[in-house]
């Protein structure tokens, strides 16, 4: 497979996937398509036991979803989902949740919006202590609707989920660990060694053993399938309602005009606050 937004490196039963969509690693429709293709390959590839996701950009794991792609999708009926209760980022997360491999995110830099939604769909997440996590959507008048609102509530509980989602501020890796969004926050000097050691240990386990554990977890959470899908449908309804109003389209237009420059994206909450003040 030849990808433009992903760099793949296979070492035996380990596949390393690095995001590479400069200048700030936006999640685009092209990246979504490539991640879907890769998930399909993983379903059929018995030679891979562990998949580790990281980024070639030390400042950005994934910045957020490309707003221009969202605007194009909203105005083009041909790009609408065939299933109105499930959108493409939600379906992508569900696809990666279902692959037989153990999936791990190794996060440094900024992980916001769709990037955090994708990371939450993986089995494990490790980050540096100064990684910045954020769901900025509520500051634009909508919600994390790629599974973010649902998965954050599941991971952090409703009280902390509301704090994360409605504050729309950057949370450090250390905070994300305390709130249950990630397994562990480590220093930038420690994270590689820790994840490499963990991967080495997992690779020693048989595929049958890994499958046994996944089957147990599937049975544990089976009663939650219908409520989770209902929550995903509510995310979609919230997005459609926001797009039909005046605030979100105006906010998106202003954000697109400002541009996803590194300067704007390094402190995205401050950029959004400045744009919101100008819109008043």
Image (cartoon, grey):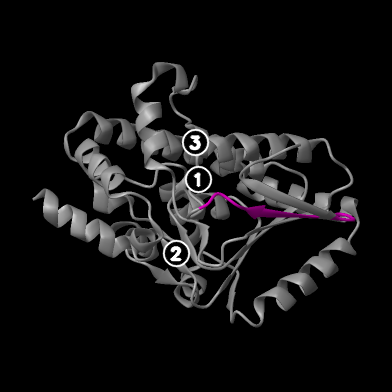
State the image quarter where residue 262 is shown.
Answer: bottom left
Q: Give the SS element for disc 2.
A: strand
In the image, which disc is placed on residue 120? none
Outermost residue on the top side: it is 78
Query: Seen in the image, is 16 located left or right of residue 233?
Result: right
Residue at 18%, 40% in the rendered image: 247
Q: Residues within 10 Å of mark 3 (few under 14, many from 20)?
A: some
Q: Secondary structure at mark 3?
A: helix
Is there CB contact under 8 Å for labels 1 and 2?
A: no
- Mark toward the viewer: 3 or 2: 2
| Above or below: residue 38 compared with residue 120 | above
Structural crowding at the residue carrying mark 2, measured as other residues with C-alpha within 10 Å and reported as few (<14), some (14–19) or many (≥20): many
Tell me the residue that label 1 is attached to. 27
Is there CB contact under 8 Å for labels 3 and 1?
no
Who's the residue at 48% across and 70% down the image? 176
Outermost residue, left side? 280
* 3 or 1: mark nearer the eye: 1
Identify residue for label 3: 229
* Distance Cα–Cα, label 1 vs label 2: 15 Å
Can you say whether 69 is above or below 109 in the image? above
Q: Which residue is labeled 2 in the image?
A: 133
Q: Is residue 217 above or below residue 77?
A: below
Q: Label 3, label 2: how many angstroms apart (C-alpha)?
A: 24 Å
Mark 3 or mark 2, which has the lower sequence index? Answer: 2
Q: Residue 280 colored magenta?
A: no
Whether residue 167 can be seen here: no
Q: Residue at x 23, y 36 (%)?
A: 249
Residue numbers of the magenta segment: 11-22
The percent coordinates of residue 41 (x first, y second) are 77, 36
**Image x and y of residue 2, in percent:** 73, 38
């Amino acid at each position: 497979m030849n990808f433009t937004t992903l760099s793949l490196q296979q070492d035996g039963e380990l596949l390393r996937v690095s995001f590479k969509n400069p200048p700030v690693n936006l999640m685009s429709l092209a990246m979504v398509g490539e991640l879907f293709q890769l998930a399909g390959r993983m379903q059929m590839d018995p030679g891979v036991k562990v998949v580790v996701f990281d980024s070639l950009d030390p400042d950005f794991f994934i910045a957020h979803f490309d707003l221009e792609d969202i605007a194009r999708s909203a105005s083009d009926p041909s790009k609408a989902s065939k299933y109105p209760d499930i959108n493409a980022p939600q379906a992508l997360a569900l696809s990666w949740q279902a692959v037989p491999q153990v999936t791990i995110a190794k996060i440094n830099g900024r992980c916001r919006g769709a990037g955090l939604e994708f990371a939450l769909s993986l089995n494990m997440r490790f980050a540096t202590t100064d990684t910045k996590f954020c769901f900025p959507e509520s500051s634009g008048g909508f919600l994390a609707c790629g599974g973010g609102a649902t998965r954050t509530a599941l991971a952090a509980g409703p009280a902390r989920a509301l704090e994360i989602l409605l504050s729309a501020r950057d949370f450090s890796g250390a905070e994300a660990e305390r709130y249950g969004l990630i397994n562990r926050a480590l220093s930038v000097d420690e994270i590689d060694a820790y994840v490499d050691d963990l991967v080495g240990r997992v690779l020693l386990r048989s595929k049958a053993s890994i499958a046994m554990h996944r089957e147990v977890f599937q049975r544990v959470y089976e009663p939650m399938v219908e409520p989770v899908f209902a929550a995903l449908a509510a995310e979609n309804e919230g997005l459609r309602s926001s797009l039909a109003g005046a605030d979100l389209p105006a906010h998106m237009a202003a954000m697109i005009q400002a541009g996803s420059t590194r300067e704007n994206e390094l402190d995205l909450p401050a950029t959004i606050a400045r744009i919101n003040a100008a819109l008043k």
